Image (cartoon, helix red, strand yellow):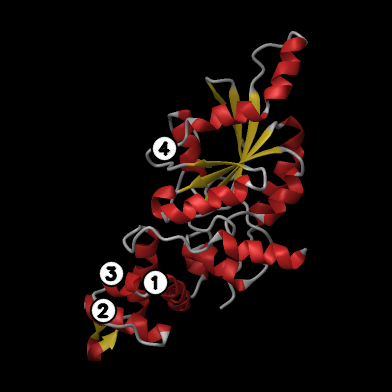
Amino acid sequence: MIVQWYPGHMKKTKDLIVENLKLIDVVVEIVDARVPMSSRNPEIDKLVKDKKRIIVLNKIDLASDSITERWIKYFNEKGIEVILVNSINGKGINKIPVVARNLMKEKIERDLARGRKNRPVKAMIVGIPNVGKSTFINKIVGKGSAKTGNKPGVTRGKQWIKLKNDLELLDTPGILWPKFEDMETGYKLAFIGSVKDDILDIENLSCELIRYLRNIDENILMKAYNLEHLEEENGAVIEQVARSRGFVLKGDEPDYFRTAKMIIDEFRSIKLGKITLEIPEEFEEDESEEN
């Protein structure tokens, strides 16, 4: 199964980012804590170049706490500031203005020396679709200033938002990249909902998710669906789950589509537990091979 989604407005978003970079002090990149590397758009690095960076690990309530700590260390060792955020309840949100101003401390001091006081720090918010960017902005602003939705690709135009603590935010629409480096990246982005479900083969996607989950811990699926064992074939696991949940059609045929969709939905909604699909060590190996 090939996973790819790059609608026309994403090209416009890329142009918007480039056009506004000269106005920006800090780039705040929102990523999904369950897939911290796969949910980073590699083109962002090329676009923002040497701008100060903050990575917001969002949706920490859905990710493994212990693996999240390893990701903090990974990014910190690369000189990147990391903030843990739950945009739903606002946890970690108030750290954004503080960290942004600390990153711009030298420039702020130079401005003060020149008699320029209370200059706001200008931050650009970037991220791929469905990592919770608009919800993050609504929470930091304290009201529904940015349109939100539970489908990828809702925010379409740029929005400037001024906060009380000398911080101005430029919101940008979610942006993917034209071609994923490998299918594993595509799968993981599809799992978290960053690629529209209606262009995907849900049954095949569920099989891939089962593959990931059983590699992490077979007990995840066995416990969630009251199974005594897991069949070798991932498609057969869908049938096991269907029968366990009573998702059976006429003629005793398992309802594969309904079951496959349920497994994906329950992963996304934490019903299968706090699960992170990638660990820093996987990417450290890739980097060492490149060097």
Identified by mark 1, the residue type is: Asp
Q: Are marks 1 and 3 in contact (CB under 8 Å)?
A: no
Identified by mark 3, the residue type is: Ala
Whether residue 282 sits left or right of residue 50 in the image: it is left
**Gap between marks 4 and 2 measured at Cα:** 36 Å
Determine crowd level at label 2: few under 14, some 14-19, many 20+ residues with C-alpha closer than 10 A. Answer: some
Q: Is residue 33 visible?
A: no
| Above-or-below relation of 46 to 212 | above
| Above-or-below relation of 187 to 52 | below
| Above-or-below relation of 233 to 57 | below
Q: Which residue is mark 3?
A: 224
Q: Secondary structure at mark 2?
A: loop
Q: Quadrant of the image for the C terminus?
A: bottom right
**Gap between marks 1 and 3 measured at Cα:** 12 Å
Q: Quadrant of the image for the N terminus?
A: bottom right
**Gap between marks 3 and 4 measured at Cα:** 28 Å
Q: Which residue is mark 1?
A: 217
- Residue 207 percent coordinates (x, y): 44, 78
